[in-house]
Image (cartoon, helix red, strand yellow):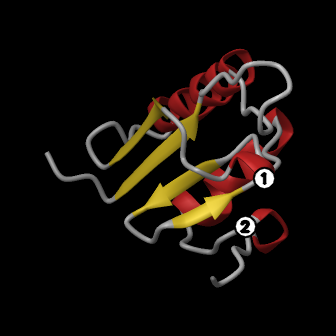
């Protein structure tokens, strides 16, 4: 099944003292919130939200990505979920204040 939007939320847990960790507990709260919005808007066949392993954006965690656009979000809090869903998922407008700006190598 092809989804119009696919939301991957990092739930990777790192050992204390390593790179910043998105964290399983926080990530799962975000997953649950996005899944609820998908269901509440009856978008189960066109939008999928799910947990993911490391997205390699640890220093920006908690992180997530919305595909197919490949827009990465960082420092995502539970209170940001509605805004990301309403702006990006429903209206194709990324939430600029949360978009990760990766440095070019």
Q: What secondary structure is marked by label 1?
A: helix
Please give the count of numbered marks on the rendered protein: 2
Q: Are marks 1 and 2 in contact (CB under 8 Å)?
A: yes
Q: What secondary structure is marked by label 2?
A: loop
Residue 52: x %, y % from top left: 47, 34
Q: Nearer the viewer, residue 19 or 86?
A: 19
Residue 105: x %, y % from top left: 63, 82
Q: Can you tell which mark lies on residue 33?
A: none
Return the residue at label 1.
60
Vertical order, 1 against 29 (above or below): below
Q: Residues within 10 Å of mark 1 (few under 14, many from 20)?
A: many
Q: Nearer the viewer, residue 54 or 38?
A: 54
Quarter-wise, where is residue 9 in the image? Answer: top right
Vertical order, 41 against 66 (above or below): above
The quadrant of the image that shows the N terminus is: top left
Q: Residue at x 48, y 37 (%)?
A: 38
Check the image and name the residue furthest to the bottom: 104
Quarter-wise, where is residue 17 in the image? Answer: top right
Check the image and name the residue furthest to the left: 1
Residue 54: x %, y % from top left: 54, 39
Vertical order, 28 against 86 (above or below): above
Q: Residue at x 74, y 23 (%)?
A: 26
* Drawn side of residue 17 relative to residue 32, left or right: right
Q: Residue at x 66, y 27 (%)?
A: 27
Q: Residue at x 65, y 71 (%)?
A: 94
Chain-order first, disc 1 or disc 2: 1
Q: Nearer the viewer, residue 9 or 2?
A: 9
Return the residue at label 2.
100
Q: Nearer the viewer, residue 63 or 21?
A: 21
Residue 20: x %, y % from top left: 80, 38
């Amino acid at each position: 099944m092809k989804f119009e939007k696919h939301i991957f939320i990092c739930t990777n847990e790192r050992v204390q003292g390593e790179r910043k960790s998105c964290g399983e507990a926080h990530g799962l709260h975000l997953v649950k919130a996005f899944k609820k919005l998908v269901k509440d808007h009856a978008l189960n066949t066109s939008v999928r939200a799910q947990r993911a392993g490391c997205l390699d954006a640890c220093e920006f965690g908690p992180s997530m990505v919305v595909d197919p656009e490949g827009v990465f979000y960082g420092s995502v809090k539970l209170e940001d979920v509605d805004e990301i869903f309403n702006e990006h998922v429903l209206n194709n407008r990324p939430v600029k204040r949360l978009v990760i700006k990766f440095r070019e190598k």
